[in-house]
Amino acid sequence: MTEYWYNVKTHEIEEDAMSDWTQLIGPYKTREEAEHALEKVKARNDAWDAQDDD
């Protein structure tokens, strides 16, 4: 099964993690999920920040 990764250095989607793991976010089941990786990261960070404020 193919896994998709978002490369934070090149801003490209990779299939099956071709780059160093320190540059990747994932894995994701679909290319579309990987394309939205930064949005998911931001949403999680915002949620964690809100918990810290409580």
Image (tube, rainbow, N blue to C red):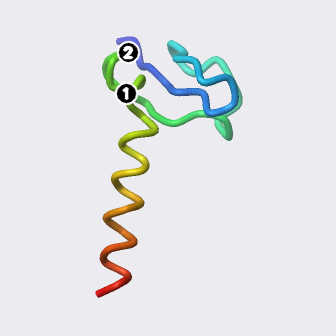
Quarter of the image for the N terminus: give it.
top left
- Locate residue 33: give its quadrant: top left
Q: Which mark is residue 11?
A: none
Q: Which amino acid does label 1 sit on?
A: Tyr
Label 2 environment density (alpha carbons within 10 Å; few <14, some 14–19, many ≥20): some
Q: Is residue 53 above or below residue 20?
A: below
**Image coordinates for residue 35, horizontal then vertical, percent:** 41, 23
- Between 25 and 48, the one nearer to me in the picture: 48
Q: In this view, does 35 lie above or below 49?
A: above
Quarter of the image for the C terminus: give it.
bottom left
Q: Is residue 29 above or below residue 49?
A: above
**Image coordinates for residue 37, horizontal then vertical, percent:** 42, 34
Q: On the rendered structure, is 51 left or right of 18?
A: left
Q: Which amino acid does label 2 sit on?
A: Arg
Secondary structure under tag 1 reads strand
Mark 2 vs mark 1, foreground winner is 2
Judging by the rendered image, the residue that carries numbered circle 1 is 28
- Between 18 and 46, the one nearer to me in the picture: 46
- Locate residue 14: give its quadrant: top right
Q: Which residue is drawn at 38% across and 81% down?
A: 52
Check contact, mark 2 vs mark 1: CB within 8 A.
yes
Q: Residue at x 50, y 13 (%)?
A: 15
Find the residue positioned furthest to the bottom: 54
Q: In this view, does 46 lie above or below 25?
A: below
- Locate residue 2: give its quadrant: top left
Q: On the rendered structure, is 15 left or right of 2?
A: right
Q: Distance between the residues labelled 2 and 1?
A: 7 Å
Secondary structure under tag 2 reads helix
- Between 50 and 13, the one nearer to me in the picture: 50
Q: Which mark is residue 31?
A: 2
